[in-house]
Image (tube, grey):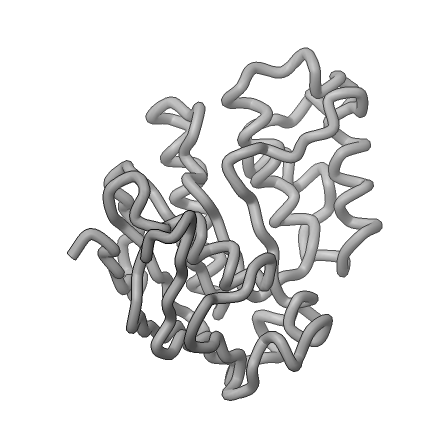
Amino acid sequence: MSSTATKPDARLTGRALSCIRDDRTLFSGLGFGVDTGEALIIEGRNGTGKTTLLRAICGIRRPDEGEILWGGESIERLGPDYHRHVAYVGHNDGVKRELTVAENLRMSRALGSEGRLSIEEALRKVHLAGFEDVAASNLSAGQRRRLALARLLVTDSLLWVLDEPFTSLDRHGIGIVEELMAEHVARGGMLVMTSHHEVSMHRTAVHRLNLSA
């Protein structure tokens, strides 16, 4: 059973967050809240701390002030009990180019909890059916990006954290990813993302946080 069905009371909250980089305050006093079935889009100019905030949400770095809570508990105290619910796709696709498409997804599944979709079903979702035995080094940049996002479908994570998920994608690819995100949220998942592109997720509860404001 997917965690999207078994954790209906999960809530991600940021309280009075501040982050500093190179003696420069990126943001301060920042707050947000995301429930299951909701998406949070983080916007702002380059250098305002969008990626830094995502890394803090993932527990990769600590905020300089404030705290991030999961179900009312600090993610720092929860540790692995929080991280097992989170899937992160950053600027770098994280695809192992020496492996085939299918081997990349098998490795992701082995490292996490098994998702509701098979590898074959996930590849059909991202329009890579028939590429199972192709080395990832032979894929285009857009195809590698879709393969990276297919990892979300073969593992079971309630919270998707995506940093510029439309990088290297054409309009068709963007539409595919928008549909995947909308389906995840509609099933009771949670989404936090950054994007320089306009995001279209109809019938989805979308909150926006502009770090440039």
Between 195 and 181, the residue placed more toward the observer is 195
Residue found at x 61% / y 49%: 152
**Where 46 sits versus 38, above or below?**
above
Give the quarter of the image for residue 101. Answer: top right
**Where 111 sits versus 130, above or below?**
below
Is 68 on the left-hand or right-hand side of 99? Answer: left
Q: Quadrant of the C terminus?
A: bottom left
Between 86 and 115, the residue placed more toward the observer is 86
Image x and y of residue 11, in percent: 47, 79
Image x and y of residue 9, in percent: 51, 85
Residue found at x 68% / y 50%: 117
Image x and y of residue 96, in percent: 74, 28
Most distant residue in the top direction? 138
Is 176 on the left-hand or right-hand side of 129? Answer: left
Most distant residue in the front direction? 23
Residue found at x 44% / y 24%: 168
Is 167 on the left-hand or right-hand side of 197? Answer: right
Residue found at x 41% / y 40%: 164
